[in-house]
Amino acid sequence: MQTTYWNGTYWPGALQWVDAFLDTLLIASDRSFTNEVKSSSISAIRSQSSTSRMQADIKRYFYQVEAYYGGEDTVQIFDAAYDDAQWVVLEWLAAIRFVQQYDDLLGSDHGESNVARFAHRARLFYNIVEGEFDTSLCDGGVTWNPTLATYKNAITNELFVSSSIAMYLYFPGDHDTDPYPHPDYLSLTNITLPALPVAKPHDAVYLENAINAYAWFKSHNFTNGQGLIVDGFHLSDNQTTCDKRNEMVYTYNQGVILSGLRGLWEATGETSYLNDGYSLIATVINATGWYADTAVEAAQWSGLGRNGIMEDYCDAPANCSQDSQIFKGIYFEHLDLFCEPLPTSKALVPDLSKLADPDLGASHAARCQSYLPWIEHNAQAALKTRNGSGIIGGWWGASYVNHTQSAASYWSVEIPADSWDERNQPWVLGQAPWI
C-alpha cells in the first residue's frame, strides 16, 4: 500500500473517504506494532533487533500519518455525504489513541502537539453530523446524503454510533474555535461558518448520541432473514416512516457497528452490547459457508461468501467500484477493534470507562479466539490472490474455484430482490427513489 501507492502526502486517485480509511489502517498498524514492542519488553523471546525494526516502522508510518494530515483534502470531504465525514472522525481519534499509547510506552509527552490538531479535525467533522439525527422522519437516524432524497442507511448510522462513542471515550477536548477545515475554505467556497464553542472532553452528549443512535438502529429492522444487515431505508411518497427497505448486503455494513458496540460496553458496562456483537459476528461467519457440512455445500453462495471466505456481490463479476474494493478490509478492522481484550484491572479511560470482571474478560477472549481459524482462512485466501507485483486481488475466494481475478460470470450471484446496488451502480442515484 505504501511502497506502491503512497506519494509522500496522500494516495493519488483514491476517494477521500477511502484515503481516510487507509490512514486509519496505517494508524492501526502502528498500534499493533506498539503492542508488540510493549509485550517484548516483558519477554525475552523477541530479539532486540526485531524490536528495533518495529520501532523504526512505527516512526516511519507515523511520519506518513503526520504528512497525510496536511495532504488530506478537507475542503472536498467537508461538504460530502454524512458517512464520508465520519471516516475522518474515526481516523483522527484513532491517531490520538496511538499517540497516547506510544507516549505511555516511552514515558514521554512528545505527541501532545499532535493531539491538539488531531482533536480539532475530529471535532470539526463530527460537528457536521451531530445535529443531523432527525426524528421527524423514520423516528430518528441520520440520512446518507443531504443532496439526495432521504435515505436512512446502515453505514451512516453505524458510523454515527461508532464516531459518537469514540468521541466520548477518546476526544480530549478542543479550545480551537476555528470552524473551517482548511485556511482556504472560505475563499474556495464562499461559505461563512460561525465560530465553534470550546469543547470539553468526555462530554456526556456524545454518549447519549451513541446510545440513542444504536437503540434506533436496533429497533428499525435493519437485518434480513439471515440476520445480515441490509443497506438502508427509503421513504415512500407522503410517508414519514421507513417503509421501503433496500435489501442490498455489503460486507462493511456488517462490521462498522462492532467498534461502536465495543465502545458502548466500555462506557456503560452493559454486556448486551457485547452479546449483540457476538451474535452478528456468528451470523457473518455462517454466511460465508464456514460451518457447512460438506465441501459441496460450502462452495454454494451463503449470503456473504462461500468456502468460508467473505465476498461482496461485485467480487466474482469484477465490477466493484473503488468503494466496494475496500469493504472487506473495513469489516476486519472493526472486528479487530471489537475483539481487543476487555480491561480487567486498568480501565481504558481512568475514572470514566468500565472494567470487566475476570469471567467476562476470559469469556470475551475465548470467543474472539474462536474466530481466529476463520480470520486466518480469509487472510490466506487474500494472500493467494497476489499477482507478480505483489498486489492483492479483490475476489479473495477466486483460487478456491480455480479462477483468476478476471470476471467470472459463472460464479456471479444475483443481488437480492428489492435491492439497489448504489455502490457499484452509481447511475441509480439519478433515479427514484434517490431523487
Image (tube, helix red, strand yellow):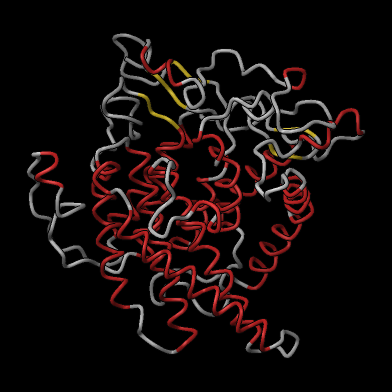
Q: Quadrant of the C terminus?
A: top left
The image quarter containing residue 48 is bottom right
Q: In x, y percent, where is residue 123?
A: 26, 56
Q: Is residue 250 left or right of residue 368?
A: left
Indicate the position of residue 80 as horizontal and vertical percent values.
29, 37
- Seen at 48% across and 75% down, the residue is 59
Q: Position of residue 343 (x, y in %)?
A: 56, 72
For the point 52% across and 74% down, which residue is it? Answer: 58
Q: Quadrant of residue 133?
A: top left
Relative to 237, residue 425 above or below: below
Q: Position of residue 377 (x, y in %)?
A: 78, 49
Relative height, residue 373 to residue 52 (above, below): above
Vertical arrangement, residue 178 with respect to residue 290, above or below: below
Q: Nearer the viewer, residue 321 or 13?
A: 13
The residue shown at (55%, 51%) is: 272
At 73% across and 90% down in the image, what residue appears?
Answer: 44
